[in-house]
Image: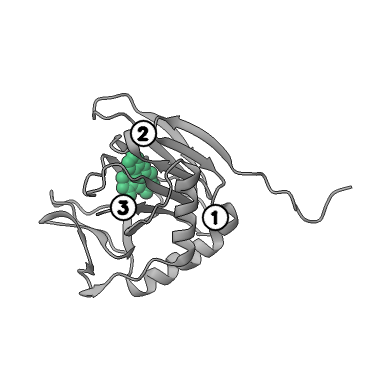
Amino acid sequence: MTPLFDDHPAPSSREPLEDGAVLLRGFAEAQSSVLVEEADRVARSAPFRHMITPGGYTMSVAMTNCGRVGWVSDSRGYRYDPLDPQSSQPWPSMPHAFLDLAAGAAAAGGFASYDPDACLINRYAAGAKLSLHQDRDENDRWAPIVSVSLGLPAVFLWGGKRRSDPVRRLTLESGDVVVWGGPARFVYHGVAPLKAGDHLLTGPTRINLTFRKVY
Ligand code: MD3
Ligand code: FE
């Protein structure tokens, strides 16, 4: 007999990636539609935009933020700004569903009482990519970055503490969460060009939430 409903969904698994980094497959699956709705709500006040790198390139990933501060890039450099430079208004506040998810994932990754200041929301369309980089604009050098993948899958590139270290590839799917903190906080990472597709939650895109402790 085939059950009509799957009342025992696959539990999320916990895979250590390296010291300080853990992959929680499916951790955000049950909340994923709420998370996408909340991201849409943030983007109605602070629209997705393609930021300019200090080197003058337009990023292929579209970005917005919520929380006390937001990550911005322009010709002057990278920084966290309490105001959206496009509107001169504060960024939308962090949705409770975002905070709950991020704190729960951080705890599952071994980082108690996580209280992120910022959530950078990245939107990838087909072909969009993120070159190998480190996230080093945050003052808290130990607190984790919590990353939540929603919608189309992406190939995540993940190296070591030096740019020249070998790069591993990991496919991240909708609902997957990765916690990167402590000794794994400054590894080089990026995202390979997104493959075209169509996802029930996000259509032709992938949305990634990255939570950050800035101060
Ligand atoms: C490992 N975002 O926003 S998430 C970024 O999928 C960023 O949109 C990617 O890199 C994305 O800066 C990757 C996974 C991730 C994020 C931050 C990290 C991994 C990390 C910071 C340190 C180490
Ligand atoms: Fe990053």
Above/below status of 170 relative to 54: above
> Which dot marks residue 138?
none
Residue in the foreground of this view, choosing between 168 and 34: 34
Apparent side of residue 12 relative to residue 182 in the rendered image (left or right)? right
Label 1 beta carbon less than 8 Å to ligand 1: no
Q: Which quarter of the picture shows residue 144?
A: top left
State the SS at label 1.
loop
Q: Which residue is mark 1?
A: 199
Label 3 beta carbon less than 8 Å to ligand 1: no
Taking the spot 26% from the left edge, 43% from the top edge, the residue there is 141
Indicate the amino acid at tag 2.
Trp
Residue in the foreground of this view, choosing between 104 and 16: 104
> Which dot marks residue 213?
3
Q: Position of residue 66 (x, y in %)?
A: 34, 65
The outermost residue toward the left is 76
Label 2 vs label 1: CA separation? 24 Å
Taking the spot 18% from the left edge, 56% from the top edge, the residue there is 79
What's the image's color scheme? one colour
Answer few, some or many: residues within 10 Å of disc 3's Cα (few below 14, many 20 plus, some between 14 and 19): some
Apparent side of residue 183 relative to residue 15 in the rendered image (left or right)? left
Above/below status of 18 relative to 146: above
Q: Which quarter of the picture shows residue 71?
A: bottom left
Q: Earlier in the sequence, mark 2 or mark 1?
A: 2
Indicate the amino acid at tag 1.
His
Taking the spot 81% from the left edge, 56% from the top edge, the residue there is 4
Q: Position of residue 55 (x, y in %)?
A: 13, 48
Q: Which residue is mark 2?
A: 158
Label 2 beta carbon less than 8 Å to ligand 1: yes
